[in-house]
């Protein structure tokens, strides 16, 4: 390890200086032998010598040998194994049985320079806490907090996510101390400010798809407020408490918290209606709508017009657009907000969602007026580009193609901030191509070329290349078509468009009518997959790489991930975010789960910490492969599929670069849930329509990243991301809870076995029969529902495009469904070709 090598060099340098003193001062033999060095065994021999020069000459030879040995490349010292300590953190009786001298000996091998130092210090603090040794626990947690708050690195990421957990524990212990010494509290409060801003700590609170501990964020702010209040720091107490209210899920407040709230209002830091809005908005984000409504109704009665408008907006957004009685109230409230809001962004949001709700109602005229009002009242506003896009799409699907193209043209020339620079060119090109005329194809070609000029290497780069290839093939220029297709394959070898390009190079025009690859393409992909299998080593040298590598090499990562799985078994009905502190502590697994979440943050930080941007793709895949081999495939897939925030590298470029790495396929397509999927398919095999194992695998990979506890913003849960209304409907028809014995829908959907079984049945008995066994339309309905798919099928039928798989995928109206379908079909093509789920 690098830090051990530094210590060794320091010792060698010390001995060099000591020998230099011997030669310069010609000190006595007695002084020479008093030097602190590994040569004390020579003392008796040197005393017996009469020739001092011979003695010094001998020492010089030894010293020269030592220097030469020091110049040799250091052998890597194995990292210290901390897995033994996990056992003692599970309950007080185990902590009492710990040999503290042995743990102290481990600590002597784990200096502050060690990558695993924060893990060791945190686990040791937990052991002391469970043993009732409060002061010793405080010292350990305090050291981590001070170490993290003093982060002087370029990124200032906070050094370790465990700093947040240590801070929380320290605040708990200090607040429970009746003899609190307040002189050190200002320093702790200052450290809390710094740590709460640190990226690695924030990642412990919120992480897309994967589980996190937002309750830590809440309680750190609450505990900080209470501690500051006890320590005569009123402004800090009020500031922390206001921050707490903005993230709290609690409904009731304690006596001390109510007093803090009263002082906060009296100090003028926030009004009562504003606080009610904060709390209602937070509960709305948590989808606790009945609780949110109480606070929002209270805020709506306040004097502040802006607070009232915002509260009304959230009340409206809790109403369904698909239920007539709720939709009526929703539209009335949104109209009120649009007319009264002083905030232009809030007014635009109200108009935007009015337009969408009116479209669901079937009132297309009023829907169009709502979007047009945005353009009239806020021509360069935050929702003006969204309004133009909605108008363009609605006109297209209503048969007013020329008016649609005009809207897309306005989008391309839009002067305000816009997310549609690529969409406008691509969508209008596909409208023109769909006319199936030479003139339409020429116009489409011009738009695609313009898109490539305006947004080179943009999100629609591969789309544009692919369709220019198809246009070239349509006009008989096969050489040019091949150039486009080969460029796509070279850029992003296993992207959906590259897979379709491979098919076109072999099948020609027939490729557009086939969902899956031809046999030659399948064989090519299978060979590439087999060649991609090899041992992967983690090569990065950042502190995050070193900590991750140490945790992986010693088995610590696998052990704490195993503890997380045990927690899932003990409390199967709840996600980590929904557990209380009492449930976490009672499980005995909280410290280990905290270590897992911190190591996940290290992995994500390591993925972004390379200075050499050319190695980003290899670095991503190395990290993904190693954490996946330790069992954490959800994190592995998150890095591969979601990408990271890398300067000057878009996520599309990141994915393309990863696909060019030789071991991409074997890392990106692991055999996750293979046995469960094959077993569910075999169990439900029948004579009707059957979902293939490859289709099911691809959906799970794309929907949930193989994370059985994945939860979307819309409340979709589990591997197949069933939303509550869909599950409730299926349960009413199939009696799922009674047959499975699951006490709740959450327990059912969080179970991989039950979720996969329902996914198979959902496709076999519901979706595939709706579409005559057509997997593409079934996939779309799974994502967006039957009504939309039926409308889109009619649109494609009118264009005589129902057999054109590629045109259908490219022109799905809902952007989210378009992306989901395209990416899942790409996964299906790869999975089917490489034989991952073949018996």
Image (spheres, rainbow, N blue to C red):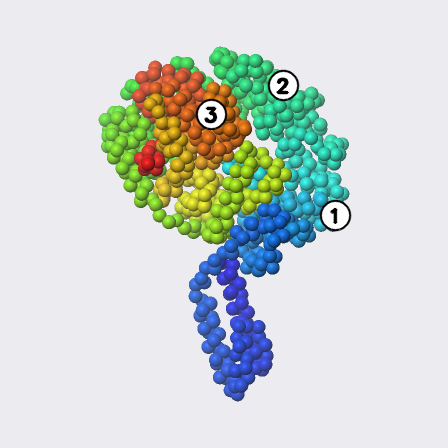
Query: SS at mark 3?
Result: loop
Distance between the Cα atoms at labels 2 and 1?
51 Å
Residue receiving disc 1: 180
Q: Looking at this view, is 39 or 708 the one in front?
A: 708
Judged by depth in the image, the label closer to the viewer, 2 or 1, is 1
Question: In the shown orientation, is residue 652 left or right of residue 227?
Answer: left
Q: Check residue 671 in the rendering and tell me which mark sits there, or answer none.
A: none
- Pointer 2 or 1: first along the chain: 1
Give residue 340's mark: 2
Q: Are marks 2 and 3 in contact (CB under 8 Å)?
A: no
Q: Position of residue 375 (x, y in %)?
A: 51, 19
Which residue is at 54% across, 13% downward? 324
Residue shown at 57%/72% (left/top)? 36
Task: Measuring from the top left, give residue 121's x and y in whole percent.
Answer: 59, 52
The residue drawn where x is 49% and y is 45% is: 603
- Gap between marks 2 and 3 measured at Cα: 27 Å
Residue under the point 66% across and 35% down: 244
Q: Quadrant of residue 232?
A: top right
Number of marks drawn: 3
Query: Which of the numbered marks, if any, corresponds to residue 414?
Result: 3
Residue neighbourhood size for the residue with mark 3, other residues' Cα within 10 Å, grouped as few (<14), some (14–19), many (≥20): some
Q: Is residue 349 visible?
A: yes
């Amino acid at each position: 390890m690098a830090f051990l090598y530094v210590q060794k060099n320091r010792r060698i340098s010390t001995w060099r200086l000591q020998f230099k003193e011997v030669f310069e001062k010609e000190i006595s033999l007695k002084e020479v032998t008093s030097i602190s060095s590994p040569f004390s065994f020579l003392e008796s021999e040197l005393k017996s010598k009469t020739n001092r020069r011979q003695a010094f000459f001998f020492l010089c030879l030894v010293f020269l040998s030592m220097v030469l040995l020091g110049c040799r490349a250091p052998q890597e010292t194995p990292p210290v194994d901390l897995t033994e300590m996990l056992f003692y953190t599970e309950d007080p009786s185990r902590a009492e049985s710990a040999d503290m001298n042995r743990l102290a000996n481990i600590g002597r091998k784990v200096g502050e320079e060690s990558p695993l130092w924060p893990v060791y210090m945190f686990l040791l603090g937990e052991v002391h806490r469970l043993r009732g040794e409060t002061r010793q626990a405080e010292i350990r947690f305090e050291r981590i907090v001070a170490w993290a708050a003093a982060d002087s690195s370029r990124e200032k990421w906070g050094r370790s996510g465990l700093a947040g957990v240590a801070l929380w524990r320290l605040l708990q212990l200090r607040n429970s101390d009746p003899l609190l010494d307040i002189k050190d509290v200002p320093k702790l409060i200052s450290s809390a400010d710094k740590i709460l801003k640190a990226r690695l700590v924030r990642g412990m609170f919120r992480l897309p798809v994967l589980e996190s501990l937002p309750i830590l964020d809440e309680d750190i702010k609450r505990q900080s407020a209470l501690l500051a209040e006890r320590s005569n720091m009123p402004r800090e107490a009020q500031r922390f408490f206001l921050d707490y209210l903005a993230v709290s899920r609690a409904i009731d407040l304690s006596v001390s918290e109510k007093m803090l709230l009263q002082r906060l209002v009296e100090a003028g830091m926030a009004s009562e209606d504003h606080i009610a809005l904060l709390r209602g908005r937070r509960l709305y984000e948590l989808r606790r709508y009945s609780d949110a409504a109480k606070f929002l109704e209270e805020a709506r009665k306040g004097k502040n017009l802006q607070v009232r408008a915002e509260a009304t907006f959230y009340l409206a957004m809790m109403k369904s657009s698909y239920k007539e009685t709720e939709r009526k109230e929703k539209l009335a409230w949104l109209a009120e907000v649009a007319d009264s809001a002083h905030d232009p962004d809030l007014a635009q949001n109200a108009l935007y969602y009015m337009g969408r709700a009116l479209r669901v109602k079937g009132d297309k005229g009023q829907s169009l007026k709502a979007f047009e009002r945005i353009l009239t009242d806020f021509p360069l506003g935050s929702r003006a580009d969204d309004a133009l896009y909605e108008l363009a799409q609605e006109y297209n699907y209503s048969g007013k193609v020329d008016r649609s193209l005009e809207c897309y043209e306005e989008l391309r020339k839009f002067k305000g901030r816009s997310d549609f620079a690529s969409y406008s060119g691509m969508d209008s090109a596909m409208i023109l191509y769909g006319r199936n005329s030479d003139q339409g194809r020429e116009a489409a070609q011009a738009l695609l070329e313009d898109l490539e000029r305006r947004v080179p290497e943009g999100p629609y780069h591969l789309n544009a290349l692919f369709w220019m290839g198809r246009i070239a093939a349509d006009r008989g220029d096969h050489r040019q078509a091949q150039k486009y297709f080969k460029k796509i394959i070279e850029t992003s070898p296993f992207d959906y468009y590259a897979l379709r390009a491979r098919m076109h190079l072999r099948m020609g025009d027939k490729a557009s009518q086939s969902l899956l690859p031809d046999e030659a393409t399948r064989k090519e992909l299978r060979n590439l997959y087999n060649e991609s299998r090899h041992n992967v080593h983690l090569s990065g040298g950042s502190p995050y790489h070193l900590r991750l590598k140490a945790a992986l090499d010693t088995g610590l990562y696998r052990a704490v991930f195993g503890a997380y799985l045990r927690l899932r078994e003990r409390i199967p009905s709840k996600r980590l975010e929904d557990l209380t502190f009492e449930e976490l502590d009672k499980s005995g697994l909280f410290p280990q789960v905290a270590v897992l979440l911190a190591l996940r943050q290290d992995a994500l930080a390591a993925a972004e910490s390379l200075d050499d941007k050319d190695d980003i793709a290899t670095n991503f895949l190395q990290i993904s492969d190693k954490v996946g081999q330790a069992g954490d495939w959800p994190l592995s897939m998150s890095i591969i599929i979601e990408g990271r925030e890398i300067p000057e590298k878009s996520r599309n470029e990141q994915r393309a670069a990863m696909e060019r790495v030789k071991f991409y396929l074997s890392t990106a397509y692991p055999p996750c849930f293979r046995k469960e999927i094959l077993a569910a398919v075999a169990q439900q095999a029948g004579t009707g329509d059957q979902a293939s194992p490859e289709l099911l695998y691809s959906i799970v990979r794309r929907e949930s990243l193989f994370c059985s506890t994945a939860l979307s913003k819309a409340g979709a849960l589990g591997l197949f991301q069933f939303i509550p209304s869909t599950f409730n409907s299926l349960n009413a028809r199939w009696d799922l809870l009674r047959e499975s014995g699951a006490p709740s829908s959450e327990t059912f959907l969080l179970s991989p076995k039950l979720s996969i079984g329902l996914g198979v049945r959902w496709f076999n008995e519901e979706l595939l029969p709706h579409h005559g066994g057509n997997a593409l339309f079934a996939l779309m309905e799974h994502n967006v529902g039957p009504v939309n798919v039926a409308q889109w099928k009619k649109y494609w039928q009118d264009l005589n495009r129902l057999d054109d798989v590629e045109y259908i995928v490219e022109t799905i109206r809902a952007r989210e469904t378009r992306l989901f379908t395209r990416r899942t079909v790409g996964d299906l093509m790869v999975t089917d070709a490489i034989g991952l789920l073949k018996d």
